[in-house]
Image (tube, rainbow, N blue to C red):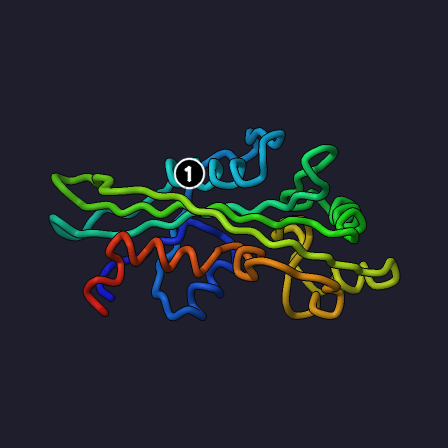
């Protein structure tokens, strides 16, 4: 694989997913303001729009040579408690009490969805030109039932301010996972199956397969 893959994310889980998949990547930042997102819309639309917003504000380093091609990935994950009627969208908790509230509200189940965006760029005449851009989405339904007696134990064991809905799947959370259906990697923050399919269709693997 000779192309550079830039990941514009601070998520430890996304880094772990790419590393575990054997996909080399370089971290970059973005300057998007996510606080103005309209959370009244469907979950899929919100997270895809946020991923595209981040893509529009990625800070990609200058190219090293004329014609250089790179790929850029952005993503966003949110948690939906409830259905089409009364529902609430959870992002990252504001503080410990907010995390506790999210955990208690999610005992009856929640949908965690991740939207992602992939862009292919080429360095021409001193600037990056976009060749193509696509977005994708995946989700899973999960029931995390953490008894009151264990909430502080759980929160003390994870970086709860950095995960959507205060739900960090795997590890310590396995013992509280009552039900699961859908994409495991989408819950962690990057739908790896769909991402690989999209990267392949955009030519990321063409020189190594």
In the picture provided, is 5 more to the left or to the right than 141? left
58 above or below 4? Answer: above
Q: Is residue 196 above or below residue 52?
A: below
Q: Quadrant of residue 22?
A: bottom left
Q: Position of residue 93 (x, y in %)?
A: 68, 45
Quadrant containing the N terminus is bottom left
- Name the image quarter holding residue 39: top right
Number of numbered labels in the structure image: 1
Viewer-side residue, 190 vs 159: 190
Q: Residues within 10 Å of mark 1 (few under 14, many from 20)?
A: many
Quarter of the image with the C terminus in it? bottom left
* Residue 109 x/y as whole percent: 73, 52
- Secondary element at tag 1: helix
**38 displayed left or right of 9:** right
Residue plotted at (57% across, 48% down): 113
What residue is pinned by disc 1?
52
The location of residue 5, given as percent across then percent down, is 32, 56
Q: Residue at x 58, y 31 (%)?
A: 41
Residue sitting nearer the eye, 163 or 131 = 131
Give the x, y percent position of residue 149: 88, 62
């Amino acid at each position: 694989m000779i192309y550079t893959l830039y990941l514009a994310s601070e998520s430890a889980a996304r880094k772990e997913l790419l590393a575990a998949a054997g996909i080399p990547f370089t971290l970059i930042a973005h300057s998007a303001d996510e606080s103005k997102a309209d959370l009244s819309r469907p979950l899929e639309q919100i997270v895809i729009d946020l991923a595209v917003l981040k893509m529009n504000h990625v800070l990609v380093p200058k190219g090293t040579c004329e014609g250089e091609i790179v790929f850029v990935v952005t993503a966003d994950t949110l948690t939906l408690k409830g259905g089409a009627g009364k529902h609430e969208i959870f992002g990252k908790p504001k503080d410990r009490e907010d995390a506790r509230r999210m955990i208690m509200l999610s005992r009856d189940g929640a949908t965690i969805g991740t939207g992602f965006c992939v862009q292919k760029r080429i360095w021409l005449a001193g600037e990056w030109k976009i060749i193509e851009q696509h977005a994708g989405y995946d989700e899973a339904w999960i029931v995390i039932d953490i008894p009151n007696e264990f909430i502080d134990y759980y929160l003390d064991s994870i970086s709860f301010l950095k995960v959507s809905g205060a739900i960090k799947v795997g590890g310590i959370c396995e013992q509280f996972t009552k039900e699961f259906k859908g994409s495991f990697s989408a819950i962690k923050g990057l739908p790896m199956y769909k991402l690989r399919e999209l990267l392949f269709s955009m030519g990321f693997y063409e020189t190594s397969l």
